[in-house]
Image: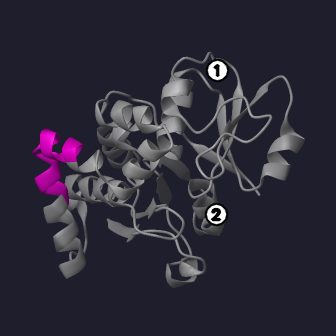
Amino acid sequence: MQIDILKYYQKGIEETFENRYDLAVLIDVYRATSSMVIAAHRGANDIFAVKTLEKMYQAKNASIILCGERNAIKPEGFDFGNSPLELLKANLKDKKVFISTSNGTRTLSAFRKNSDNFIATSFLNLSPTVEYINKKNYNKILLLCAGSWEKFSLEDYLCACIILSHLEKELSNIDDDKTLQITTGNYFHSSKPELQKVLQHTDHAKRLKNIGKYDDVEFITSSIDHYEEIPVIKMID
């Protein structure tokens, strides 16, 4: 098994990766992929990642729920923001959820030609993601850490490292970079209190706290592996 990790998205970085992967896993813990997991948990039939607000507004109808943010704030006319805690209270049964965010959907759009299969992962469904990968027997996997405005986000990277550490025995090649990632993943996986402490004090968590969105951070860090859903992401440019 080959697993590559995008540590965080920067414009044009997709050109440095291989053209085709059996599976691409989007990781945008605060908060897009956590929202996608909860949307699936609340009964959404399909989840679409949409790059622009214009396309979101064009798609609006009675069967489609608009979710997302710009600069962490819900855009005007959206049904929900980019909040997993908010979506946890929603009835999304038989609905299509369209989501557009500042970082996660931009990363997806950049890498949409690199795979035919995209799923959403956060700490909410970390272990089920590993089980899903093993069950499907994928050989080439890309873990896409979205980051935050083209900067490194520790919460995304730690999620990817833990996934990698769970799949260590399946890896065909382990270089120095992967050795460090696996070691990091094993350490934080073995100590949930330490993991939660670190996650609650990342730069992104602090920014969310400053704008009154820290309840999502508390929810995510207290709900590690609480959900089984593996959202399949479809894309609309």
List x then y, in percent, for residue 12.
Answer: 60, 81
The extreme right residue here reads 58
Q: Position of residue 171 (x, y in %)?
A: 25, 66
SS at circle 2: helix
The C terminus lies in quadrant: bottom right
Gap in Å between the C-alphas at discs 1 and 2? 26 Å
In front of the other: 237 or 17: 237
Residue underneath mark 2:
112
Asked if residue 52 is positioned above or below residue 73 in the image, the reply reads below
From the viewer's perspective, tell me whether residue 195 is left or right of residue 88.
Answer: left
- Residue on which the image places disc 1: 92
Say what amino acid the circle numbered 2 marks. Arg
Q: Which of marks 1 and 2 is nearer the N terminus?
A: 1
Query: Which residue appears at 48% of the width and 37% of the height?
Result: 212
| Most foreground residue, 74 or 14 | 74
Q: In which quarter of the image is residue 214?
A: top left
Residue 175 shows up from this direction: no
| Range covered by the magenta-colored residues | 185-197
SS type, badge 1: loop
Amino acid carrying label 1: it is Leu
* Image location (x, y in percent) of residue 196: 22, 42
Callouts 1 and 2 close, C-beta under 8 Å: no
